[in-house]
């Protein structure tokens, strides 16, 4: 991630100057940008106008979120046995080990 950040800081501006040619159109001429701005601006105005209400709503939602995370964690980890969380099978798909509990000297022949 460190090298990705370094490349984004150093290489991206150089490539932009080399690869982007011509006049760059303003945001307001792009219909998708205009639509997204028309949705974003009223939401931003509401949040900035009623910051206390938004903060109280976020603080009120935090215990509900914490409860749901705890419930989900219990459901996920209840099915997993202890010690098998990092188990990774290394056999090919479809392989069934018949006789792993039997004597290892038995080769499985029926003669």
Image (cartoon, helix red, strand yellow):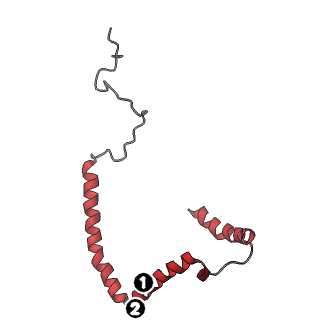
**Mark with earlier residue (1, 2):** 1
Cβ atoms under marks 1 and 2 closer than 8 Å: no
The residue under label 2 is: 49
Q: Secondary structure at mark 1?
A: helix
User: Residue drawn at (73%, 72%), measured in percent from left and top?
Assistant: 17
Q: Point out residue 46 in the picture as x, y percentages from the top left corner.
A: 40, 87
Q: Nearer the viewer, residue 100 or 35?
A: 35
Which residue is most to the top? Answer: 111
Secondary structure beneath dot 2 equals: helix
The C terminus appears in which quarter of the rendering? top left
Q: Nearer the viewer, mark 1 or mark 2?
A: 1
On residue 43, the disc is 1
Which quarter of the picture shows residue 2?
Answer: bottom right
How far across and how far down the image is residue 41, in percent?
A: 47, 85
What residue lies at 66% left-to-right and 79% top-to-bottom?
A: 25
Find the distance from the CA under tag 1 to the CA under tag 2: 10 Å
Residue drawn 25% across the image and 61% down it: 71
**Residue nearer the viewer, 89 or 16:** 16
Q: Is residue 81 above or below residue 60?
A: above
Which quadrant, please, contains the N terminus? bottom right
Q: Does 91 sit left or right of 81 as displayed?
A: right
The residue located at (64%, 65%) in the rendering is: 7
> Residue 9, relative to residue 82: is it above or below?
below
């Amino acid at each position: 991630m460190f090298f990705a950040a370094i490349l984004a800081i150093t290489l991206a501006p150089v490539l932009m100057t080399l690869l982007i040619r011509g006049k760059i159109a303003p945001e307001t001429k792009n219909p998708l940008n205009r639509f997204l701005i028309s949705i974003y601006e009223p939401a931003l105005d509401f949040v900035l106008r009623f910051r206390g209400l938004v903060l109280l709503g976020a603080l009120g939602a935090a215990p509900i979120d914490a409860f749901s995370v705890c419930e989900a964690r219990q459901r996920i980890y209840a099915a997993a046995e202890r010690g098998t969380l990092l188990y990774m099978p290394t056999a090919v798909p479809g392989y069934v080990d018949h006789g792993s509990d039997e004597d290892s000297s038995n080769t499985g022949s029926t003669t």
